[in-house]
Amino acid sequence: MELTYKKKRRLIQAAALFLLLQPVFLGTGFWFGTYLSADFLGLALTDPLTVLEISAASQHLWLPLLLSGLPLVLLALIFGRIFCSFICPLHFFLEFLPVEKVKKTAPRGPLLLLMLVLLCSFLLGLPVFAMFSPLHILQRLLLFGMGLEGLFLVALAVFSFFQGAKSWCRMLCPLGALYGLLGFRRQLVIAVDPDLCTNCGRCQQVCTMGTSPVQ
């Protein structure tokens, strides 16, 4: 039986989730940490937004921190928002919500929140998104168990029910906005073959992010 693209992507997402949890269940492994910051086979990795937040909060550029964010920046430059599509555990679980509708929304929301997060980190001296992001709340719950933070995820599910599929990703997520900016000029994109396109509109119907392929 041939797997569809969606099923292949979900298998990769599940594997990434296992990667996050394997030190808990196996007690050892080649990955230690979270998607904020981790050690992968001795290579330090930090997500780009965390690098910016810590730099803004401390008002200091620390070279080891900058270097730990470089591999993920390079991946985003080549593949765009690959973290959002294939790694993010929040994205993985949100896809199972029984919500089909997608509302068209202004694309500036995540960018504005990205600027607000960095400004608040600078003014407060704290990595704001790392503390209050539903993505990182979900990671903490998976690693350390359920707490009151889980109510925020319940609220997010209710929000998605009324606002449409993946509302957080489409309307608010500053990390997705940053990856989108990094991958704006990427060469690997999904494009329309004008010789085969029949303008049936199925692309827009099946895309839960409400986007269209490059014309």
Image: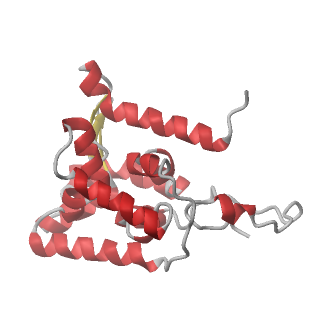
Residue 55 in the image: state x and y as whole percent.
Answer: 19, 63
Give the residue at x 33% y 71%.
114
Residue 74 in the image: state x and y as whole percent.
Answer: 45, 53
- How many numbered discs? 0
Pick whichever, 2 or 188, lies toward us: 2
Rendered view: 91 above or below 199: above
Rendered view: 73 above or below 43: below
Image quarter of residue 109: bottom left
Q: How is the image coloured?
A: secondary structure
Image quarter of residue 133: bottom left
Q: Can the viewer see residue 67? A: no
Residue 29 in the image: state x and y as whole percent.
Answer: 30, 23
Quadrant containing the C terminus is bottom right
Residue 11 in the image: state x and y as whole percent.
Answer: 53, 35
Q: Can the viewer see residue 179? A: yes
Image quarter of residue 153: bottom left
Pick whichever, 170 or 57, lies toward us: 170
Give the residue at x 50% y 66%.
164
Give the residue at x 54% y 73%.
103
Residue furthest out toward the right = 195
Classify residue 88 as left or right of residue 41: right
Quadrant containing the N terminus is top right
Pick whichever, 116 or 64, lies toward us: 116
Classify residue 98 as left or right of residue 88: right
Give the residue at x 22% y 60%.
132
Rendered view: 70 above or below 207: above
